Amino acid sequence: MGDSIGFKGVLSDLGGPTANMYKMTCKSPTIEQACRKLSCVHPGICENLVTDHGPLIKLMKRVREQPGVKKVLIASGVRYDLAEKSPEFVRELAKHHVGGQLSVAPEHVSPRVLEKMKKPGIAAYERFAERFTCASEAAGKEQYLIPYFISGHPGSTLADMVSLALWLKARNLRPRQVQDFIPTPMSMATCMHLTGIDPLTMQPVRTVTDLREKKLHKALLLYWDPAQQDLTREALRKAKRLDLVGHGPRALVPPPDPRAARKNAASGRPQRRTP
Ligand code: SF4
């Protein structure tokens, strides 16, 4: 490995799309053959899934002991619902494989949106975050989780986005990179986005297709950004949550600045309707 041309000894992401499902499989081929479930990890981790992180921990150790390897990072893709089954994995991860920041993707906090995404509940993320912080402290390292969230996913309403914004504010989190939902081929979410129906239940699903509404959803994630606050106020008005516009500790955005409105009026610039 050390002889590879251009290799400087740093592996930037050992895990790939899912960092901690190495050698995880159904406990019995017979059970697996008869199984008709769509997922081994949703809703909830199947009792028949072997969630032993031992083979992965051995692999991580072997890779970092290879001659010429200086650092082996796991940058993203940790399934925190599985990770919480192995405190040893979290310790190894925090001690050896994080370069200051670890990206994780809770995506949302609303149970009904997470259900559409087939993701674990936000409580699993919170437990993982606590364990990761403790493991980092024990390893004497200052490092952070970077949680990613998505706006405009099928199933998500303005009320769900308000809940997400409040969750972020309560934790003093200010996401800078916000993903707005983009339909991609062959995914269940795209099917819901285009048809407005959940193909698993055949029940209607709320979707966001209007460009302005998509912007409002996204603005709630960026509520802390002054450049987004007109949109955030508009979103809160539509969500009937004007109680969150103000200067109090719970408020997401301040009221509009009357000086800016006067300046816009004087310049003849069209004014957005604000609460
Ligand atoms: S869902 Fe459960 S029973 Fe089915 S294949 Fe996965 S682990 Fe096995």
Image: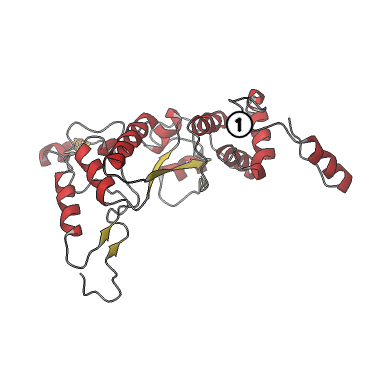
The quadrant the C terminus occupies is: top right
- Name the colouring of the figure: secondary structure
Left or right: residue 118 compared with residue 268: left
Q: What element does badge 1 sit on? A: loop
Question: As drawn, is 203 to the left or to the right of 273?
Answer: left
Question: Which quadrant of the picture is home to ligand 1?
Answer: top left
Name the residue: 50% across, 35% down. Answer: 172
Q: Residue at x 28, y 53 (%)?
A: 15
The type of residue carrying mark 1 is: Leu
Q: Position of residue 225 (x, y in %)?
A: 61, 42
Q: Is residue 249 left or right of residue 149?
A: right
Residue 82 falls in which quadrant of the image?
A: top left
In this view of the protein, can residue 41 be seen by the observer?
no
Name the spot of residue 189 as percent of width and height, x first: 44, 42
Picture coordinates of residue 54, whole percent (x, y): 14, 44
Residue 32 x, y percent position in the rendering: 16, 39
Residue in the foreground of this view, choosing between 42 and 263: 263
Label 1 environment density (alpha carbons within 10 Å; few <14, some 14–19, many ≥20): many
Q: Is residue 110 visible?
A: yes
Q: Tell me: residue 186, above or below residue 151.
A: below
Relative to 275, say whether 40 is above or below: below
Q: Which residue has dot 1 on it?
A: 252
